[in-house]
């Protein structure tokens, strides 16, 4: 059933309207073509009869001869609508067909054409519409006018009958085409209905992604929906991890306060114990709520990696004045990062800060682009001359909260946060041995075209 406002209903009614217009126009054109054809055939038949009478007249040399006649029996039947008359130049009647007896049939009043033939449509005394053709012939110095009339009413009746039959046939064809249009619309739009059900299944929690095979026209839509779902899942997971990071950071200070208060006696200790308990409960409550909240999508954002790295190197030079940070600034053709600028600052800032902490005074930063399996990617290389990491330690350090040196200030969550953000954007993070002797971090992130954005000169 076609529901009001649906695409199938719109297609059906548009198709039906176009079919009605096309079929009515076709019927009119076919009827007109048939009418012209019959009229032309009648005219050609009358021309033939005129030529026949002319030939007989010239052969007999006597316009009143019984041999001057036509063999068509319709010219012998009264009121048949088929007549022929031969008149003198002065209008006197010279010869005629049997069907004309008792009828006053006028001559053709129109001017002759280039072939000496004139034609006109009149009505006989019985109301029959006639097509008349007339031609002048000169015999022995005398001019005779030969007039032949054919029954045009018969032609009009045939056209009327043809018109009725044509519209009946075209109407039946229109109904079949309309039914086919509705059927095709429903069949063609089934993939959209399947896609709608697949999206609904995701919304209801019955499926993790839009599944199924779709036509090439809507397959990209299904894939984009899945990409959006994957991005949303990663963002939610990232939010949960960040909430866990916050819980991890607050848990120890609150526990210390509670333990210290429990070891003391007095009003102040009681107040601290009570308030820390409230703090613990509130943190647990709101952190649990935060775990269920989703972050804003990063779709459609882009940022200038060169400008971000310039700012970060300036900040790190102030924080770590004893470290030399060499930043090889790329040219203006470097593609932008396809994502949020704050996320890029968090990723690169953590990596650069770690490099400065572990280096022996030398850190290098390079930006470039490369094309891989995922298309064009932004490549960030940060290396140092510190102790570096073994292959096993490089894999271990990316785990959540893992720290290889507890003496260095920090929570151990920096690289973990970086990894989460990189995964959200579909990038990659690799830890290798640097040519400087320490650790080389290779960060790959998706790129966005500049799209008319201009990088400030001299920034």
Image: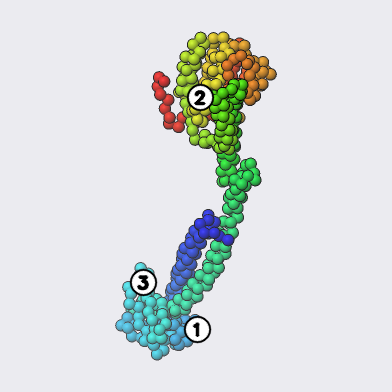
Specify the quadrant of the image occupied by residue 251.
Answer: top right
| Front of the two marks 2 and 1 | 2
Q: At 33% across and 74% down in the image, what residue appears? A: 110
Residue marked by disc 1: 73
What is the quadrant of the N terminus in the image?
bottom right
Please state the horizontal and vertical placement of residue 20, each as a whole percent of the image: 49, 64
**Dot 2, crowdedness within 10 Å: few (<14), some or many (≥20)?**
some
Give the camera-side residue of 58 and 252: 252
Give the camera-side residue of 147 and 264: 264
Residue marked by disc 3: 116
Q: At 45% across and 87% down in the image, what residue appears? A: 78
| Circles 1, 3 touching at the beta carbon (< 8 Å) | no
Please state the horizontal and vertical placement of residue 174, each as a whole percent of the image: 53, 65
Please state the horizontal and vertical placement of residue 105, each as a whole percent of the image: 37, 84
Position of 157 relative to 304 (above/below): below
**Dot 3, crowdedness within 10 Å: few (<14), some or many (≥20)?**
few
Secondary element at image label 3? loop
- Alpha carbons under labels 1 and 3: distance apart: 27 Å
Secondary element at image label 2? helix
**Dot 1, crowdedness within 10 Å: few (<14), some or many (≥20)?**
few
**Sooner in the amino-acid sequence: mark 2 or mark 1:** 1
Task: State the colouring used for the structure image.
Answer: rainbow
Q: Is residue 369 visible from the viewing direction of this image?
A: no
Residue marked by disc 2: 345
- Alpha carbons under labels 2 and 3: distance apart: 98 Å
| Circles 2, 3 touching at the beta carbon (< 8 Å) | no
């Amino acid at each position: 059933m076609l529901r009001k406002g649906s695409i199938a209903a719109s297609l059906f009614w548009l198709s039906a309207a176009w079919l009605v217009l096309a079929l009515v126009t076709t019927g009119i054109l076919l009827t007109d073509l048939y009418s012209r054809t019959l009229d032309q055939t009648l005219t050609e038949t009358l021309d033939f009869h005129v030529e026949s009478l002319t030939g007989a007249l010239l052969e007999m040399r006597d316009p009143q001869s019984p041999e001057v006649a036509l063999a068509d029996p319709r010219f012998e039947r009264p009121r048949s609508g088929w007549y022929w008359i031969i008149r003198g130049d002065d209008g006197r009647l010279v010869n005629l067909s049997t069907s004309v007896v008792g009828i006053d049939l006028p001559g053709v009043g129109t001017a002759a054409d280039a072939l000496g033939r004139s034609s006109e449509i009149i009505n006989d005394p019985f109301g029959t519409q006639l097509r008349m053709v007339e031609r002048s012939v000169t015999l022995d110095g005398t001019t005779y006018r030969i007039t032949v009339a054919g029954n045009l009413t018969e032609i009009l009746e045939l056209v009327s009958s043809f018109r009725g039959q044509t519209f009946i046939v075209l109407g039946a064809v229109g109904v079949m085409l309309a039914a086919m249009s509705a059927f095709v619309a429903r069949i063609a739009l089934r993939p959209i209905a399947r896609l709608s059900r697949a999206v609904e299944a995701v919304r209801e929690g019955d499926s993790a992604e839009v599944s199924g095979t779709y036509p090439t026209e809507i397959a990209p839509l299904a894939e984009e929906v899945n990409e959006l779902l994957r991005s949303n899942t990663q963002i939610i997971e990232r939010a949960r991890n960040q909430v866990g990071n916050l819980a991890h950071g607050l848990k120890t200070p609150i526990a210390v306060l509670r333990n210290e208060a429990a070891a003391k006696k007095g009003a102040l200790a009681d107040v601290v114990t009570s308030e820390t308990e409230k703090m613990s409960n509130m943190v647990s409550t709101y952190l649990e709520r935060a775990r269920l909240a989703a972050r804003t999508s990063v779709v459609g954002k882009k940022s200038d990696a060169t400008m971000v790295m310039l700012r970060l190197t300036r900040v790190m030079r102030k924080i770590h004045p004893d470290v030399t940070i060499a930043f090889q600034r790329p040219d203006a053709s470097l593609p932008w990062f396809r994502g949020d600028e704050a996320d890029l600052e968090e990723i690169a800032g953590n990596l650069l800060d770690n490099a400065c902490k572990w280096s022996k005074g030398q850190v290098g930063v390079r930006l470039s682009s490369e094309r891989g399996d995922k298309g064009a990617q932004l490549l960030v290389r940060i290396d140092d001359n510190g102790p570096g990491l073994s292959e096993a330690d490089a894999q271990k350090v990316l785990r959540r909260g893992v720290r290889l040196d507890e003496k260095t200030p920090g929570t151990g969550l920096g690289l973990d946060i970086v990894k989460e953000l990189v995964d959200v954007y579909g990038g990659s993070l690799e830890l290798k041995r640097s040519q400087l002797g320490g650790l080389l971090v290779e960060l790959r992130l998706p790129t966005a075209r500049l799209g008319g954005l201009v990088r400030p000169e001299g920034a």
